[in-house]
Amino acid sequence: MTTDFQLTFDCARPGVLVDFWCAALGYVVEDPPAGSATWDAYWRSIGVPEEELDAQRDSADSIVDPDGAGPRIWFQRVPEPKVVKNRLHLDLKVGGGRTVPLAERRARVDAEVARLAAHGARALRVLEPAGQDYYAVVLLDPEGNEFCVA
């Protein structure tokens, strides 16, 4: 039996990360549950205290794969800033795999890095070990969370 799960990013600005990760993954903003016009209305209907809602009213805070294949991602507002390297990160695989020539994979990765930079990502370092058939770029999302494009 498998276990259903979601990924959760602790963050300061859920709306910024919702926009970025929708663009990065092709995800969409998650609709509120049936019968609720907004997420605020839903949270109120299940008894979430008003002071907790006030901190999250700037935008939607969860995204989903429109095809239903990938996990739900929730961006949870927290008061403390990110201060250390992620212990878990996403690898965005755009190169096409080892059956694609390295030069073509590199071009695909670099194009995706440029596209994500236009959405607020910053390149941190290139991973291109000498003598290996491998190329990837480590980036930071708008709040400094590491992820790779390979």
Image: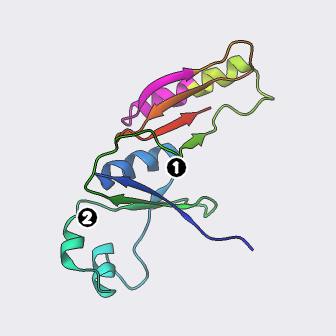
Residue 44: in magenta span: no
The x and y percentages for residue 146 are 47, 38
Q: If the image is split into quadrants, where does the C terminus sit?
A: top right
The x and y percentages for residue 46 are 34, 86
What colour-coding does the image apply? rainbow
Identify residue type, mark 1: Gly
Residue bounds of the magenta highlight: 110-126
Q: Is residue 37 above or below residue 82?
A: below
Q: How many numbered marks does the figure carry?
A: 2
Foreground label between 2 and 1? 2
Q: CA distance from mark 2 to mark 1?
A: 23 Å
Q: If the image is split into quadrants, where does the N terminus sit?
A: bottom right
Question: Circle 2 sits in a helix, a strand or a loop, which is it?
Answer: loop
Residue located at (27% from left, 83% from top):
44
Q: Residue 56, labelled with which disc?
A: 2
Q: Is residue 124 above or below residue 6?
A: above
Nearest the viewer among 132 and 109 is: 132
Question: Circle 1 sits in a helix, a strand or a loop, which is it?
Answer: loop
Nearest the viewer among 113 and 67 is: 113
Identify residue type, mark 2: Gln
Q: Is residue 138 above or below residue 54?
A: above
Q: Is residue 53 left or right of residue 17?
A: left
Q: Name the residue furthest top.
A: 130
Residue located at (21% from left, 64% from top):
55
Q: Residues within 10 Å of mark 1 (few under 14, many from 20)?
A: few
Q: Name the residue furthest right.
A: 99
Would you name the residue on which mark 1 appears? 26
The image quadrant of residue 76 is bottom left
The x and y percentages for residue 68 are 61, 64
Q: Residues within 10 Å of mark 2 (few under 14, many from 20)?
A: some
